[in-house]
Amino acid sequence: MKRRIPALLLALLVTQLGALVNPAYACGCGAMVPDGQSRIGVDRETSVVRWDGRTEQIVMRFTVRGDAQRAAWIMPVPGRATVELGDGDMFGELRDLTRPESKARYYFWPRDRDWPFSSGRGDLAGAAPPGAGDAAVGVVGREQLGDFDVARLTATDPNALKTWLETNGFKLPDRLAAEVQPYVDQHWEYVAVRLAPRQQGKALRGELDPLKIRFDSDRLVYPMRLSRMAKTPQSLGLYVLADHRMEPASPIGGSRPKVTFAGSVHPTDGPIAELAGGKPVFLTAIDQEFPEPGRIDADHELRATAKDTPYRRAVYHNELLTVGPGIPAWLLTVSAVLVALAGSCYALVRRRRRLREDQAA
């Protein structure tokens, strides 16, 4: 996800309609505001962003917990968007592409699990995710995508937007109008989503089906500002597919973003290849924690780094240093020393014996 692509989505309020009459809701990336009937929380949001300099595509998936059977959220986007279901296999493919490299760290002297103490295996060492509207709210489109009821909206008044959402079944926090105002001022649009599993009585838990949002953009911005309403710590996993290595311009109130992978990839088939248009792209994987979501003060602005320096994490496992067909180096060294000592002792004994013989003669 590279470069800066106008804003995208996510900053979201996760809203939970735990019951049909008095729904509970959660807002922002996982903050819970329960009503005593049901709960939902987003532990982690993982998004894949593809930007080619003109168009931005975002595939996002949430990992949730709680007992709510219904949920809703709203995502600000910088332009007219299309929405469809994403391919969940994409995230497994990305995990494989960015998997840490396994490296050996050798040691010389035997340890507890090595011969002659035990069986001879090195131990592991760790390394260093349609309703009627208001004049100020326009309904661009509405569609049913699997378990998702998706409404694409425009709004010139944040209070009118909040009213429309509540009228159409989205129970949202009172703070919504104030938090959405910056997006209204920038003439952004909104993707409102309601999720209710088709299987009656099924609670929303684990990894939800991903959604794919596409819109035109000449810069990369990942909206996070609405996440400031969350009440619990948040975790963000971001995969960026672009022409260059990307980085957030600032931590926006969270911990320092960590790059877990950076490198050029060229998948020939599968969902990543489809998202990349069959072209080589530079993949940057970024993880970030938000221990205090209330400190989030902006959206993520992503920019290209000065150099496309590749990076891959390494997980080290300790191995006993061996030579040839698995012979421990320490054993050869000790054996050589013992042989040398034995040879020296033998030579010394021979020399002394010759001296005595010479003296006796």
Image (cartoon, grey):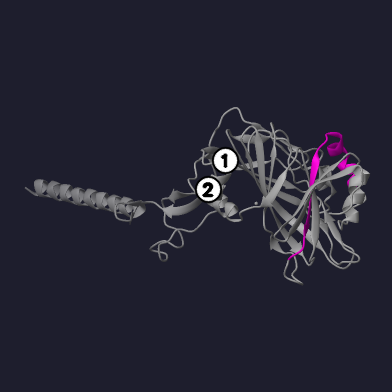
Q: Secondary structure at mark 1?
A: strand
Disc 1 residue type?
Leu
**Residue closest to the eye, 137 or 265:** 137
Q: Quadrant of residue 200?
A: bottom right
Give x and y (percent) for residue 42.
Answer: 75, 56
Q: Is residue 134 visible?
A: yes
Rendered residue at 25%/49% (across/down) = 340
Give yes or no for residue 189 being in the magenta stretch.
yes
Q: Which residue is mark 2?
A: 97
Q: Quadrant of residue 113?
A: bottom left
Name the mark on residue 283. Answer: 1
Q: Is residue 286 above or below residue 250?
A: below
Q: Is residue 322 above or below residue 201?
A: above
* Label pair 1/2, CB-CB below 8 angstroms: yes
Please give the count of numbered marks on the rendered protein: 2
Q: CA distance from mark 1 to mark 2?
A: 9 Å
**Residue closest to the eye, 72 or 118:** 72
The N terminus sits in image quarter: top right
> How would you rate the neighbour count of disc 2 (Cα within 10 Å): few for under 14, some for 14-19, many for 20 or more?
some
Disc 2 residue type?
Leu
Q: Secondary structure at mark 2?
A: helix
Q: Is residue 127 visible?
A: no
**Residue closest to the eye, 117 or 15:** 15
Q: Which residues are magenta?
A: 176-197
Give x and y (percent) for residue 233.
Answer: 77, 52
Rendered residue at 71%/33% (across/down) = 249
